[in-house]
Image (tube, rainbow, N blue to C red):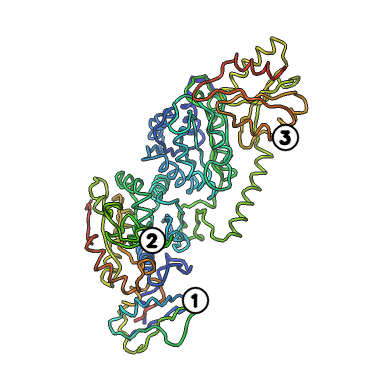
Amino acid sequence: MTVVFEKPKALTDAVLHYCPGCTHGIVHRLVAEAIDELGIEGRTIGIAPVGCAVMAYDYFACDMIEASHGRAPAVATGVKRSMPENIVFTYQGDGDLASIGLCETVSTAARGENITIIFINNAIYGMTGGQMAPTSLLGQVTQTSPYGRDPKTQGYPINICELLSSLDAPAYLERVTVNSVAHVRQAKKAIKKAFQNQVEGKGFSLVEVLSACPTNWGMTPQKALEWIDEKMIPRYPLGVYRDKED
Amino acid sequence: MQEKVLMKGNEAIAEAAILAGCRHYFGYPITPQTEVAAYMAKRMPKIGGTFLQAESEIAAINMVYGVASTGKRAMTSSSSPGISLKTEGISYLAGADLPALIVNVQRGGPGLGGIQPSQSDYFLATRGPGHGDFHVLVFAPSSVQEMADLTSLAFDLAEKYRMPAMLLADGTMGQMMEPVVLPEPTELTREKPWAVTGTKCAREHNIINSLYLSPQELERLNIERFERYKTIEATETRWESFMMDDAEICIVSCGITARVSRNAIVEARKQGIKVGMIRPITLWPFPEKPLLEAAEKVKAFVCVELNMGQMIQDVELAIKCRKPVSLCSRVGGMIPSPEEVLAAIKQANE
Amino acid sequence: MAKLTFKEELCKGCGLCVNACPKKILTLSKTKLNAKGHAPVECEKPEECIGCASCAIMCPDCVITVER
């Protein structure tokens, strides 16, 4: 018998601190699998955000930097300009990337920095206990939208892939999810491509992953996966928003 | 002996940084320091370096954080309102023990303030510019020559002690032109085993980080950092004494006001008043020792500065309030004249 | 012929693997808790496992190794 599935080498043995059923763990694994398959662990530098994934620096076996809230793309820009031969990725949540760090996100994409961004969109602030995110859905009840997100006072969700697709520079933008085996397989392809692009010097690549937060959504893990299908995908359609082939 | 070149203060910083081995500059336009960015924009592409006009001061300091994480020399420059924005990043640099140079060519504040010279970021710089317990090395140049020399020194000490350094110039220093002998190019030889450069799968991963959820560990790291600060206070404090041998009045001033004070001292001496000056070159660490020694000899201190009285607090602390300290200051972009300083000297002498 | 190995101590009992399994042979333990207090996943009918790795693909915590 041969091993057909095991923990990728680019993940350390540290125990993930995420809640039961949180899909951060799946996405971490997909990133690590991509790093393993491309054979780039030794030259990869990852940048962790502020938010639930703050301790990603303990989980990835490559060199890691912990950035301040929202600034990971700016830090990545500095690292990539300093070490152009290295592979640089950021791993950011929706509060980090789409709210406090939106300026850095847009500007880094507009410059077409040759980096890879893994963007976790779970429509909520997880680490601080479930507040409204820029990507929270209309009507979504959170700690800070207790009567449901009202567009009159709290505005509309931000669709990052669509927003960035209005820019010239990005090489690759795709939205995926990880709520089923088939979707995880597709997410894996997208994440690997986002790294492959950087290896080939194609420029800015971002993969948005619709992710589940059972704890702060107040659902069982399985129900949370279904909620992605029912509520999130209609607002955030899956698919490729940019793919510059050479 | 190298030849002298006539340079603007801001340009001297930029060229000295390049000579110090800095190949990564990130900035954002703001008066009165924009010449640093403009100079770097011209020079960096020609020497294989990076000039990047960032989307914000916040992004610029975080780009510096990125380069510093890889162990290379990086800098940003700004003026007071922009430095407020950078303080978050400076705190993270300090928390992650990363070296970097931040130039602050100060203008008047608060708020948008004005664009004329000021020293009103003294507190901001010397008390640790950002949240948390920390210091940055703070250098106060008083000539274009020092703009160059202290840039070089700042990079070196920042690296030696793994901490950010701030060149705290006032707007006059940035804008004035003087002949300057540029420093010799620095050879970069320091090993940085802590840097993130890729593990090459040959070592454990390095982590650049300032998050410590264990209070015991965070306390230990803070204490260790302050132990390092003690060494710096003991060995890296710099100042210049001027006519202090027989002085009865001691002026304390840095930057442009030290130059004005020098003229006032020469005039006061002509009038028979024994006055000298201790000019701090490092504002953190602050030259407490020479001031305390001076307190044994002089009868009064006069602090000359471009703010409502900030450095004066450090002077009073340094001399343990043993002698009276008076303030001679102008703010908002105004600079005291030698006559105003002379009047303050005379008043202190009475 | 396929074999599943569980790193039981890593399991948080979220059950995503249980739902992903096409043969419906996984369950959360009804008799034990791991050190973290979670009921870990178990395979009720190992002989029926087809080694498709669906469980491992959906596991957020790399609990499952699949051999075939």
Report the quarter where the N terminus of chain B lies.
top right
- Point 61% across, 34% down: residue: B283
Q: Nearer the viewer, mark 1 or mark 3?
A: 3
Q: Amino acid at mark 3?
A: Lys
Is residue C57 shown above or below A111? below
Residue picked out by circle 1: C36
Q: Nearer the viewer, residue B9 or A234?
A: A234
Is residue C9 shown above or below A146? below
Q: Secondary structure at mark 3?
A: loop
Q: Is residue B1 visible?
A: no
Residue placed farthest to the front in the image?
A147
Distance (Cα) linking label 1 and label 2: 28 Å
Q: Nearer the viewer, mark 2 or mark 3?
A: 2
Q: Amino acid at mark 2?
A: Gln
Distance (Cα) linking label 2 and label 3: 52 Å
Residue picked out by circle 2: A143
Percent position of residue A221, x then y: 35, 73
Percent position of residue A178, x then y: 30, 67
Q: What chain letter is assigned to the residue under label 2?
A: A
- Point 61% across, 60% down: residue: B216
Q: How busy is the neighbourhood of tag 3: few (under 14 within 10 Å), some, or many (20 plus)?
A: few
Residue picked out by circle 3: B320
Q: Nearer the viewer, residue C19 or A130?
A: A130
